[in-house]
Structures are given as structure tokens and as C-alpha cells.
Image (spheres, rainbow, N blue to C red):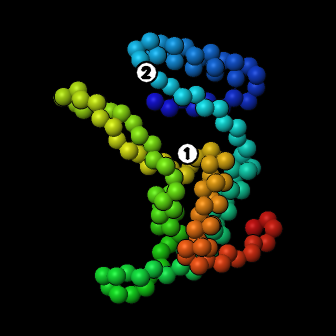
């Protein structure tokens, strides 16, 4: 269960914490455990990070990196979306969730890949840095200079 609330005033913060406390109080009586995470947001910073990643970073990687297709014996290039999925798989830790098997009632755990959109601004900045470092050191990418405002 994931509950997300945007708090932009002391009143909305107070109401949100009271509501979440009520939920957690009832659920923890039955042994459930919760993690409350408070994350600051900055829409401009968030937009700039994602714009850099989806624009020049992935574009430079897609244009410069050739990968050997061993089955066909040829070198191929991948589109930016393929690189995005590759780096997400490589650098973003998955989440795990419990679920109940219908019929048997057995509790199992499954792994779920986290989307880049689910990352906080700080997590995304760290992800972007890892992608750039990997691209330069392991793939030989030379990032092009971007003019201010593009």
C-alpha cells in the first residue's frame, strides 16, 4: 500500500499526518509495519533532471554506442527508450511486495521494477549521475555540450 499526499501548507501537513496516523494506528494493531517517508519536491528541478536525461543524455548514448549482436555477427545501435530500460534495470533497486495466492491463501513475495518516475528528485539525480558515469567509463560516450536553455 502506497499513500502519497502533497502538502503545501502547515494545515495540509497537519491534516495529512493525522490521517496517516489513524491508518497506521489501526493497521499496526494487526502486526503490519509501515515506513513514513517525507520528501521535498521542486517541480523546476524535477523537470530539468528529466529533461536532461530524456534529451541529451539518452540521445548521445543512442547515437554513439554500437553493441555487437553475437547471433547475427553485426554491430547495432539501440534507441533511447531501450537504453532507458537498460539503465533502470541496472541502477534502480526493485521493490518487493507481499501478496496472497488465491485459493491457497499462501503469502508470497514478488519483485517489482521501480519506474524512474517513482524516484525522488535526489534519487533521480543520483541515477542520472550513475548513467553518465557508466556511459563514459564503460561505453566510451563523449557527451556533447548543450547550449543554455535547450
Circle 1 — which element? helix
Quadrant in which residue 8 is drawn? top right
Give percent across and percent down for residue 73.
Answer: 35, 87
Q: In the image, 17: left or right of 77?
A: right
Single out the residue that lies furthest toward the front. 137
Mark 1, residue position? 118
Q: Quadrant of residue 38?
A: top right
Q: Quadrant of the C terminus?
A: bottom right
- Labels 1 and 2: the sequence-earlier one: 2
**Residue 65 picture location, percent across and down:** 53, 79
Picture residue at 56% right of the left edge, 49% below the top:
117
User: Could one spot residue 63 in this view of the protein?
Assistant: no
Q: Residue furthest left?
A: 103
Q: Dots 1 and 2: beta carbons under 8 Å?
A: no
Distance Cα–Cα, label 1 vs label 2: 23 Å
Q: Quadrant of residue 74?
A: bottom left
Q: Position of residue 98 (x, y in %)?
A: 36, 33
- Residue under the point 23% across and 26% down: 105
Q: Secondary structure at mark 2?
A: loop
- Label of residue 14 in the image: none
In front of the other: 28 or 116: 28
133 to the left or right of 44: left
Image: 97 above or below 14: below
Neighbours of disc 1 within 10 Å: few (<14), some (14-19), many (20+): few
Seen in the picture, residue 28 relative to 57 is either above or below; the reply is above
- The residue depicted at 18 percent of the width and 29 percent of the height is 103
Residue at the extreme bottom = 73
The residue labelled by disc 2 is 32
Is 2 placed left or right of 127 in the picture? left
Q: Residue at (39%, 36%) from the top-left corner? A: 97
In front: mark 1 or mark 2?
2
Position in image of residue 44 (x %, y %): 75, 49
Amino acid at each position: 500500500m502506497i499513500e502519497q499526499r502533497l502538502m503545501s501548507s502547515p494545515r495540509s501537513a497537519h491534516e495529512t499526518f493525522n490521517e496517516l496516523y489513524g491508518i497506521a494506528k489501526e493497521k499496526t494493531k494487526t502486526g503490519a509495519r509501515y515506513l513514513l517517508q517525507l520528501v521535498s519536491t521542486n517541480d523546476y528541478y524535477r523537470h530539468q533532471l528529466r529533461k536532461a536525461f530524456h534529451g541529451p543524455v539518452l540521445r548521445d548514448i543512442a547515437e554513439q554506442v554500437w553493441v555487437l549482436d553475437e547471433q547475427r555477427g553485426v554491430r547495432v545501435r539501440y534507441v533511447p527508450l531501450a537504453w532507458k530500460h537498460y539503465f533502470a534495470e541496472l541502477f534502480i533497486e526493485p521493490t518487493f511486495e507481499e501478496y496472497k495466492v488465491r485459493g491457497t491463501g499462501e503469502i508470497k513475495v514478488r519483485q517489482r521494477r521501480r519506474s524512474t518516475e517513482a524516484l525522488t528528485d535526489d534519487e533521480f539525480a543520483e541515477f542520472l549521475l550513475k548513467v553518465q558515469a557508466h556511459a563514459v567509463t564503460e561505453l566510451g560516450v563523449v557527451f556533447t555540450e548543450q547550449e543554455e536553455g535547450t
